[in-house]
Image (cartoon, coloured by chain):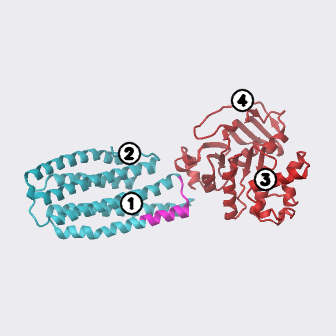
Chain colours: A cyan, B red
Amino acid sequence: MGVREKFDRELEQLKTLVINMATKAEQALASAIQSLVEQNENLALQVIDNDHDINRLDEKINETAIWLIAKQQPVATDLRKIISSLKIANDLERIGDQAVNIAVATVKIANQPLYKPLEDIPKMSERVQNMLNGGITAYKTDDLKLAKQVADEDNAIDEMYHTLIQELLQKLTESPELTNQITQLAFICLYLERIADHVTNICEHMIFAIEGKRVDLNR
Amino acid sequence: MKLASVNQPQTETNGNFNKPVIEVSGLNLWYGEDQALKDIHLNIPENQVTAIIGPSGCGKSTFIKTLNRMVELIPNVTITGNIMYRGQNILEPKYRVEELRTKVGMVFQKPNPFPKSIYENVAYGPKIHGIKQKKILDEIVEKSLRDAAIWDEVKDRLHENAYGLSGGQQQRICIARCLAIEPDVILMDEPTSALDPISTLKIEELVTKLKQKYSIAIVTHNMQQAARISDQTAFFLNGELVEAGPTNEIFSNPKNKQTEDYITGRFG
């Protein structure tokens, strides 16, 4: 029998909670983007409503982590994993909020024809979704190499964001009657860029948990 | 006890630690044919707390008892290496062990006050060292009991038997007794393992204050205690020093897997 079987099980349960929360955040982002592309107000409202599930998981993770620290007095890798779980949950909660923000923006422009078919925003969101999926996979399997690859994607997302913003601002000066729509689309680009930053944070927390090193991948 | 010839000591400086008051290098110890300590190199920094941790039988208590040569009370002990106390090798035969044990005091796991009054317990050491004037003894007793954080609890019953005190109080009387002869280093061999949680925390608080004046080495089975009160932690296993370093680093990111396994309780 292992010496700390119960504690090891509890650590696994904590990790499972984080994975569940990550999956819900991933679904929220996917649904938010789908609602935007389809201009589907009902789907957007569902994303907003479902955010409570993500927040509840965040609370559960906090509670579990605090009890583990109090009861088990973890040190070294165990402590780093628990602390990282708290930090990752925090970033996932913010990703959920950004998905809600995308949904809110979608609702604001749901009833107006888009000035052009969306191409670049879905491309950007696909890359961000791939980042998030990669980050979750890396976390599940403790794959540091994958985590670093995912974090490297953030620079490309930043470049896409700046390019899109420039285009949207240009369009705004040409067509001031589209101010509301352009503004909401610009915000959506910002939310996607922020989500990519949060995924990079998650990769940093993973590196800290496994290697005990603090790195800044948000360069 | 046989004291064999010695090697040159190694000295290392570390930005986290004060200069060493004790420098151990190449220390080996045998009980008969059984080697209990293997090539130990460890510095005890001045005015800091060094925790010695490790599983039962790893050599923790043996190691700490070499630092004041208490280990030589056990028959058939052989020691090689160096233990430098303030630049002098205490293992050299000409080194006066009585003087060493004045400067390097010890507190044991089980509180062991003398079957005497509280006053006599603390005054015993100074009296042995030739102090006879009552006024001076009174001052020493009060100062020692204050420094051991027990004066207020016993000042009105100094002439009662120390056996009437609780375990935690008795242990603080033992610490006062140690302080009365003005040591430089205090060795503590699991000083709180026989005490209740509140007494344990009081002793820990006392250790944190005592390090301002004394250098302390403490053997403990309680890893949280080691993490709470020490500046340096040294992990022993099977007579070897596996890893020593700043306590923050040992408990957050140890370099050695054996250390990690032990402190996380995976070591079975």
Crowdedness near tag 3: few (<14), some (14–19) or many (≥20) residues, C-alpha within 10 Å? many
Residue A64 shown in magenta: yes
- SS state under label 3: helix
> Label 2, label 1: how many angstroms apart (C-alpha)?
18 Å
Q: Which mark is residue A89?
A: 1
Q: Which mark is residue B144?
A: 3
Horizontal relation, residue B105 to residue A180: left or right: right
Q: Chain ID for label 4?
A: B
> Label 3, label 2: how many angstroms apart (C-alpha)?
51 Å
Spot occupied by residue A168 in the image (x, y as percentages of width and height): 14, 51
Q: Which numbered disc flags the more N-terminal residue, 2 or 1?
A: 1
Residue A51 shown in magenta: no
Q: Do the residues labelled 2 and 1 touch (CB within 8 Å)?
A: no
Horizontal relation, residue A75 to residue A32: left or right: right
Q: Please identify, in this view, whether the residue under mark 1 or under mark 4 is nearer the observer.
A: 1
Name the kind of residue labelled 1 in the image.
Ala
> Label 3, label 1: how many angstroms apart (C-alpha)?
52 Å
Q: Identify the residue under disc 4.
A: B7
Q: Residue A216 carries which label?
A: 2
Crowdedness near tag 4: few (<14), some (14–19) or many (≥20) residues, C-alpha within 10 Å? few
> Label 4, label 3: how many angstroms apart (C-alpha)?
39 Å
